[in-house]
Amino acid sequence: GENVEQHPSTLSVQEGDSAVIKCTYSDSASNYFPWYKQELGKGPQLIIDIRSNVGEKKDQRIAVTLNKTAKHFSLHITETQPEDSAVYFCAARGRGYSTLTFGKGTMLLVSP
Amino acid sequence: KAGVTQTPRYLIKTRGQQVTLSCSPISGHRSVSWYQQTPGQGLQFLFEYFSETQRNKGNFPGRFSGRQFSNSRSEMNVSTLELGDSALYLCASRQGQGDEQYFGPGTRLTVT
């Protein structure tokens, strides 16, 4: 089955800096890669996703890149703010009735 | 449109008891997935239902079961509770096979 590795497990940045979280996946058939943000006491919130026919996608301060050949994808957050502090999860999924396989998560702490 | 809702939000049970958790998906979504989230294991997939049929099942013992009703609402049951079942149980819904998946706030289950 699919295996998703996520790094780093914790990331501390200063407000205004950029943050990058990286994930690798094992199944070359995976074609959908979402990112979720989970704040304390809440369920994961979908913040951005990318499909295998696209190499990069951007939404305001958040961007995701995908390298299918290397089987890795990354989340980039620019101009970080304290409210970006949360746990971020990457995931991968194949076609049809395939399910999401999640990475172990990255705790991002943005200090003012 | 209302998001995914889960009831109850918090639950305390004793070892050996059983518990039923409920999930109402986003209106129009035909799929409901269940995940167990713990600090040590992260997000682990339990099962997924599409239009009342179980399409996928994770690697959990038979004590964990679920079902989906004709209105897409889903329930998850855990019998003979163990201390290790203490976790946040998350429900997620999606409209169709290739679509985005949205999570509810979760049910925090504590087994004493």
Image: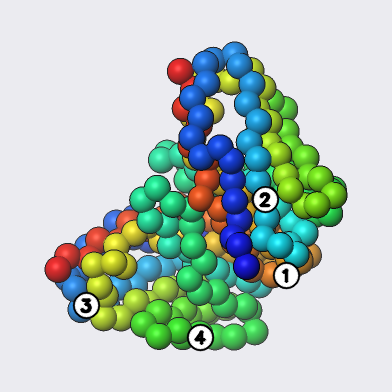
How far across and down, in percent of the image, does residue B24 sit? 67, 50
Image position, residue A70 (x, y; %) = 53, 74
The verdict on a common chain for dots 3 and 1 is: no
Q: Which residue is mark 1?
A: B98
The amino acid type of the residue labelled 2 equals Ser
| Residue bearing the label numbered 2 | B24
The chain carrying label 1 is: B
The residues tagged by marks 2 and 3 sit, at their Cα atoms, a distance apart of: 39 Å
Viewer-nearest residue: B30 or A28:
B30
Secondary structure at numbered mark 4: strand
Measured in 3D between alpha carbons, the distance from the residue under mark 3 to the one under mark 1, in whole angstroms, is 34 Å
Identify residue type, mark 1.
Answer: Gly
Q: Secondary structure at mark 1?
A: loop
Residue A88 left/right relative to A1: left
Q: Are marks 4 and 2 on the same chain?
A: no
* Disc on res. A17: 3
Numbered disc in front, either 4 or 2: 2
Query: Looking at the image, do the residues carrying marks 2 and 3 touch, with CB atoms under 8 Å apart?
Result: no
Nearest to the eye among marks 1 and 4: give it.
Answer: 1
- Image depth: mark 3 or mark 4 in front: 3
Q: Is residue A80 above or below residue B90?
A: below
Residue type, mark 4 in image: Glu
Circle 2: element type: strand
Q: Residue at x 81, y 45 (%)?
A: B69
Q: Residue furthest front?
A: B1
From the viewer's side, name the closer residue of A21 and A5: A21
Could you tell me which residue is drawn at 77 percent across and 52 percent down?
Answer: B72
Residue to which mark 4 is pinned: A56
